[in-house]
Amino acid sequence: MSVLTQILMQGTVDGRGLRDIKPPLEVPQTLFPYFIGAVVILGFIAASMWFYFRKRDQILEVPVDEEVDVARPHEVAYERLQAIETSDLLARGDVETYYTQIAYVLREYIGARYHIPALELTTTALLHTMLSVQIGTQYVERVQQLLAHCDRVKFATYQPELSEASARIADARWIVDATQVSDS
């Protein structure tokens, strides 16, 4: 190592001697980009505050005299099951969509009726959740049977007969009938 250092210090490179290090470059300092950036940021903050206070000051007026008619979960389920039944899905041979819609309506009803995130749960998790909120086992078993039929059609390419498809609508209606909230 010391030999290399001595050779480099004594010799010249390409016949030239060693040169000194160049001084650092002088970069002119302008504040214009910083000024533009600050103006943009302050403008964004001012616009955000203006929208926030404008939105906050708006008062949502709800007429007191009018009653809001909120459909109960079983009424919505009946309407949607009726719409599925009257659709031409079976006539077109779209059995998978037919069963998917039945399962969706049933899950939506269970979610609204029992306040369970039924649309986000797997069938097994839904059934365990239904048992944990103490829904009767007979209802859970019927839901299990219906969803198992629907899952078989959706995921296992099972092709049911037309009478089976009608039976699934009847099963879904029975579940809605048996679990709906009474009027009293």
Image (cartoon, rainbow, N blue to C red):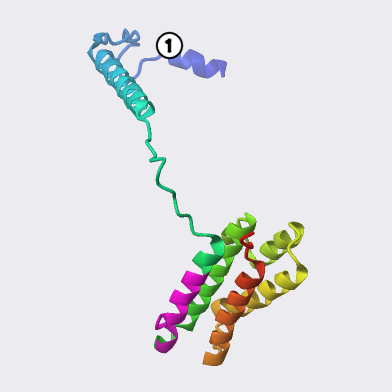
Residue beneath the point at 62% across and 72% down: 177
Depth check, front residue: 140 or 22: 140
Q: Quadrant of the N terminus?
A: top right
**In the figure, 48 relative to 86: above or below?**
above
Question: Residue 109's spot in the image, x, y percent?
Answer: 57, 64
Question: Residue 81's spot in the image, x, y percent?
Answer: 50, 74
Could you tell whether 9 is left or right of 20 in the image? right
**Circle 1 sits in a helix, a strand or a loop, which is it?**
helix
Question: Residue 15's spot in the image, x, y percent?
Answer: 30, 17
Depth check, front residue: 9 or 60: 60
> Residue 89 appears in which quarter of the rendering?
bottom left
How many numbered marks appear?
A: 1
Asked if one can make out residue 123 in the rendered structure from this viewpoint, the answer is yes
Residue beneath the point at 44% across and 50% down: 68
Q: Quadrant of the C terminus?
A: bottom right
Q: Which residues are magenta?
A: 78-91
**In the figure, 63 relative to 31: above or below?**
below
Could you tell whether 41 is left or right of 3 in the image? left
Asked if one can make out residue 161 in the rendered structure from this viewpoint, the answer is no
> Dot 1 corresponds to which residue?
10
**In the figure, 143 relative to 39: above or below?**
below
Could you tell whether 136 is left or right of 54 in the image? right
> Residue 47 appears in which quarter of the rendering?
top left
Q: Residues within 10 Å of mark 1 (few under 14, many from 20)?
A: few
Depth check, front residue: 122 or 146: 146
Is residue 90 found inside the magenta-colored segment of the image?
A: yes
For the residue marked with disc 1, what is the amino acid? Answer: Gln
